[in-house]
Amino acid sequence: MRYLILPEKVQARVQELADRISEDYQGKTPLFVGVLKGAFVFLADLIRATRLENLWVDFLAVSSYGDATVHSGEVQILKDLSVSVEGRHVILVEDIVDTGLTLRYLRQLLLDRNPASLRICVLLDKKERREVEVPVDYVGFEIPDAFVVGYGLDWAERYRHLPGIAVVDGSEAS
Ligand code: 5GP
């Protein structure tokens, strides 16, 4: 296990994203929608780094991988939102965009519910892995094609608590 992005680099970038979001949503009360479980750490830091007077938070839970590291192509909603997005300025917050299948599905799901606006914010972008196009408005880091953990991201439920982004290299199996 080695860090690809050190904890202090993550924090600095989260602050930059929060600054941009604070400017873009000045005077509004956006609804941040976090995608569980992976995005919960990012979302928690992101909202605390904003300078917005008001914001709302809600969560969706999806399952697209199970415990495998390969995308099954299936997106399953395990938990839906508890508030309505109709007429709201929604910011969909996701840990990582890989093939794009999950975000494309969630984007359409939210758009069908008539938000006033919808933007997507991801911490990590594995651009070279993209299979379907999805517009991402705020990106923390572009990363190479490697399976990463930490800062909310897991490997079979492990390593979510690491404060930076680390690469799983196979030596952690036991
Ligand atoms: P996509 O649908 O874009 O292929 O995948 C998005 C989801 O796959 C993410 O929300 C995340 O749960 C999972 N994922 C993709 N790449 C990684 C990775 O490198 N590490 C971890 N832990 N999850 C990943």
Image (cartoon, rainbow, N blue to C red):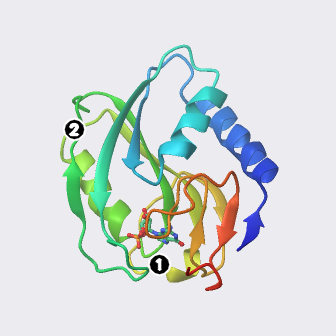
**Foreground of the two, 134 or 14:** 14
**Left or right of 24, for residue 97:** left
Q: At x 28% / y 78%, what residue is drawn?
A: 73
Q: At x 27% / y 62%, what residue is drawn?
A: 105
- Which amino acid is tagged 2? Asn
**Vertical relation: 35 (above or below) 102:** above
- The quarter of the rendered structure image containing the C terminus is bottom right
The circle drawn on residue 130 is 1
Q: At x 21% / y 62%, what residue is drawn?
A: 76
Q: Position of residue 56 (x, y in %)?
A: 41, 24
Please, what secondary structure does the residue beneath circle 1 have?
A: loop
Q: Position of residue 6 (x, y in %)?
A: 79, 58
Q: Position of residue 68 (x, y in %)?
A: 38, 79
Tell me whether the residue at label 2 lies in contact with that at label 1, contact meaning CB atoms closer than 8 angstroms.
no
**Ligand 1: does it lie within 8 Å of the C-beta at label 1?**
yes
- Figure quadrant of residue 117: top left
**Vertical relation: 5 (above or below) 101:** above
Q: CA distance from mark 2 to mark 1?
A: 27 Å
* Mark 2 or mark 1, whichever is nearer to me: 1
How packed is label 2: few (under 14 Cα within 10 Å), some, or many (20 or more)? some
How packed is label 1: few (under 14 Cα within 10 Å), some, or many (20 or more)? some
**Left or right of 166, for residue 30:** left
Spot the residue most to the front: 174
- Which amino acid is tagged 1? Arg
**Foreground of the two, 111 or 142:** 142
Disc 2: which residue: 114
- The quarter of the rendered structure image containing the N terminus is bottom right
Please, what secondary structure does the residue beneath circle 2 have?
A: loop
**Vertical relation: 87 (above or below) 13:** above
Q: Earlier in the sequence, mark 2 or mark 1?
A: 2
